[in-house]
Amino acid sequence: MSILKTLRDTDEKIPIINDNSLEDLCFFKYAHRKFYWNNCSEIYDKMGELTFERWDDIKYLDYKVTLNMFKDDESYNCIDKFLTNTQPKKLFHIVNTHHDNKSIFNMKEWNLIVKQLNKYNLNNVVIEIVNKFLVDDEIYVDGLNKCNQIFNAGRVEYFLFIDSERFIFKDKKYTDYGRLI
């Protein structure tokens, strides 16, 4: 779930979602769980779809980063299809999962994502990086510097979860109350 959509419902750069069932998409590749769901709450309740065709409808992509996900070409295809769709505004939510117990920036997948994103002009894309490493010693400014590896983005925002109910955004601590994790 997007934190920006929760914190800033009226931000003009964030696309307005009129129909979640048509405009939201979740991508996840982990072990036998793979590919596309309408939203991330469905990942453990039903099988994902191996393909997705309605790319031009998608305004919001929840992209779950997991170890070795790029061994499957669909991980690249998903990014490409989303970034080249016809939506005038997009929100790209990139988040690691607790499964791998690593900071998103310490995963080799981070560099692959940055390389893929830097192929595009991202002026109409708000990129939301969420690091769910859940440790107090992760340094927020270090994550911001890693986010700056993404060029040509309209906007990149960074959120660092320090435990399951608290995160840092722009050097301020917020409490989640279990809605986002």
Image (tube, rainbow, N blue to C red):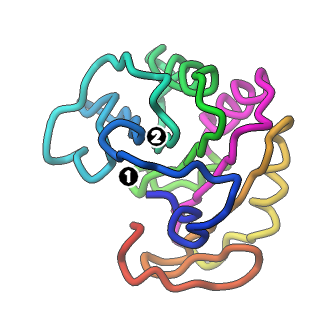
Q: Residue at x 39, y 40 (%)?
A: 26
Q: Quadrant of residue 158?
A: bottom right
Whichever of callouts 1 and 2 sits on the residue coming sooner in the sequence is 2
The Cα atoms of the two marked residues, 1 and 2, are separated by: 8 Å
Examine the rendered structure and indicate whether residue 55 appears above or below residue 167.
Answer: above
Where is residue 130? Give x, y as percent: 58, 58
Where is residue 80? Give x, y as percent: 59, 20
Q: Residue at x 36, y 77 (%)?
A: 178
Q: Amino acid at mark 1?
A: His
Q: Secondary structure at mark 2?
A: loop
Residue neighbourhood size for the residue with mark 2, other residues' Cα within 10 Å, grouped as few (<14), some (14–19), many (≥20): many
Q: Which mark is residue 99?
A: 1
Examine the rendered structure and indicate whether residue 67 appears above or below residue 4.
Answer: above
Q: Is 34 left, or right, of 70 in this rendering?
A: left
Examine the rendered structure and indicate whether residue 2 appears above or below residue 66.
Answer: below
Q: Is 160 left, or right, of 30 in this rendering?
A: right
Furthest residue toward front: 18
Where is residue 81? Give x, y as percent: 54, 19
Q: Residue at x 43, y 76 (%)?
A: 164
Q: Secondary structure at mark 1?
A: loop
Q: Is residue 139 magenta?
A: no
Residue neighbourhood size for the residue with mark 1, other residues' Cα within 10 Å, grouped as few (<14), some (14–19), many (≥20): few
Numbered range of the magenta stretch:
107-134
Q: Nearer the viewer, residue 72 or 47?
A: 47
Q: Residue at x 77, y 21 (%)?
A: 119
Quick one: quadrant of the N terminus? bottom left
Reading the image, the residue beneath label 2 is 66
